[in-house]
Image (spheres, grey):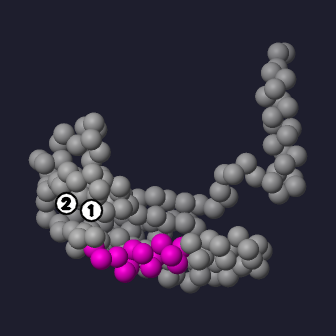
Amino acid sequence: MKFNFWAVLLVILSLFLNIWGINWGVPDDERISLVFGSFLETKETIRQTTDFAKELMLDVFHVTHFTPFPGSAAFAEADRYGAFEKDWRKMNMLKVCFIPKGLTVRELEDSQRKAFLEFYLRPRIAFEEIKGIFRDPVSSLIRIFRGLHSLISIFFSKGQDD
């Protein structure tokens, strides 16, 4: 039976590092990244997506806005499905540059805020964060402060006019 020496060595090294609690930089929590505001998005599909994410046993939740980037098929089709502002400064998935028919910029921004609040203000998430502080205080506090900074910037942003 033939085997690759380097593959076996990598597996042994990986097992050794995992035993000592050293990971390869891959997060050990369950994450989801969602995109709101795609071509056929409605208030109802946003609600269903948010509810689905809350049903999963996730630790990290992130929502961005659909952005039809230049050169993509979505860029060529965007005008057919809604209003598309081709401003490069807004093409970063954080600002709304595409608004599907039937929705407004305000509704998309409010949906993102509401989804974050509904996800992170659940008892299970709060309890896990408190447990994390006792397991690894420095990393947990850094993550919490970064998260608070992100939430503050999302909730107190000036909206689309900045």
Residue found at x 30% / y 77% = 158
Residue 153 percent coordinates (x, y): 42, 75
Examine the structure image and report whether residue 157 is included in the region drawn in magenta: yes
Question: Is label 2 in a helix, a strand or a loop?
Answer: strand
- Numbered badge on residue 24: none
Identity, as a three-letter code, of the amino acid under mark 2: Ile
Residue 141 percent coordinates (x, y): 67, 77
Q: Which residue reaches farthest top? A: 2
Can you tell which quarter of the image residue 82 is in? bottom left
Is the residue marked by circle 1 packed among few (<14), some (14-19), or many (20+) residues within 10 Å? many
141 vs 64, left or right, is: right
The answer to whether any part of residue 132 appears in the image is no
Residue 71 lies, with reference to residue 117, above or below; the image says above
135 vs 54, left or right, is: right
Residue 7 percent coordinates (x, y): 79, 28
Residue found at x 35% / y 70% = 112
| Magenta residues, start to end | 147-159
Residue found at x 22% / y 54% = 87
Residue pointed to by mark 2: 99
Residue pointed to by mark 1: 96
Identity, as a three-letter code, of the amino acid under mark 1: Val
Are dots 1 and 2 in contact, CB under 8 Å? yes
Quadrant, the C terminus: bottom left
- CA–CA distance in space, label 1 to label 2: 7 Å
Question: Is label 1 in a helix, a strand or a loop?
Answer: loop
